Image (cartoon, helix red, strand yellow):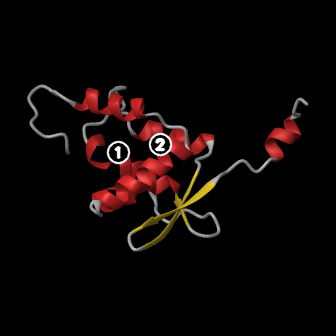
Amino acid sequence: MFLSKDDILGCNDIAYKDVSAFGGTVRIKTMTGAERDSWEDSLVGEDGKPKKDNKTTFRASLLVRCIVDEKGNRVFGDKDAEALSRKSAKSLGRLYEEARKLNGIGKDVEEEIEKNSEGVPGEDSISA
């Protein structure tokens, strides 16, 4: 059976997964296409090259877009990525892996960011 435009636009295709972290339960969701585009755009500067500070907040920048409350509303704003990145690496890692899998983000995305962030001439740090 082929789906119609109304079938596609009317279906609820946002998935959720509850993950144990930070001593409680954190809900992760799939991003919409627009949210995914916004996240990917946030990783690249105006020159088309990866932003230098991506390695610092890469995981957190995804998580702030995927962590939601019980009603599906985002818990964090985009600008909260830096603060979130200061939390436990173990908890962030567990949440990131679930968000990555749920959103179909391959390890190649992270590897590409890391590769492009290395060896910036004349700079010893990747943070701004």
Indicate left or right for 33 with 126 as reference.
Answer: right
Against 84, residue 12 (above or below) is: above
Against 49, residue 71 (above or below) is: below
Confirm whether residue 85 shows in the render. Answer: no
Residue under the image location 16 percent in, 28 percent down: 120
Q: Which residue is mark 1?
A: 58
Foreground: disc 1 or disc 2:
1
Estimate the spatial distance between the alpha carbons at disc 1 and disc 2, rounded to whole Å: 10 Å
The amino acid at mark 1 is Phe
Confirm whether residue 75 shows in the render. Answer: yes
Residue under the image location 27 percent in, 61 percent down: 86
Residue 18 image offset from top left, x and y in percent:
55, 62
Q: Which residue is mark 2?
A: 39
Badge 1: residue crowd in 10 Å (few <14, some 14–19, many ≥20): many
Indicate left or right for 6 with 124 as reference.
Answer: right
Residue 12 image offset from top left, x and y in percent:
76, 51
- Which residue occupies the foreground of this view, 11 or 37? 11
Residue 43 image offset from top left, x and y in percent:
38, 38
In the picture as drawn, the residue positioned furthest to the right comes out as: 1
Count of numbered marks: 2
Label 2 element class: helix
Badge 2: residue crowd in 10 Å (few <14, some 14–19, many ≥20): some
Against 88, residue 107 (above or below) is: above
- Which residue occupies the foreground of this view, 121 or 28? 28
Label 1 element class: helix
- Which residue occupies the foreground of this view, 126 or 63? 63
Quadrant in which residue 44 is drawn: top left
Residue 90 image offset from top left, x and y in percent:
31, 58
- Which residue occupies the foreground of this view, 11 or 90? 90
Q: Which quadrant is home to the N terminus? A: top right
- The numbered dot on residue 21 is none
Indicate left or right for 123 with 53 as reference.
Answer: left
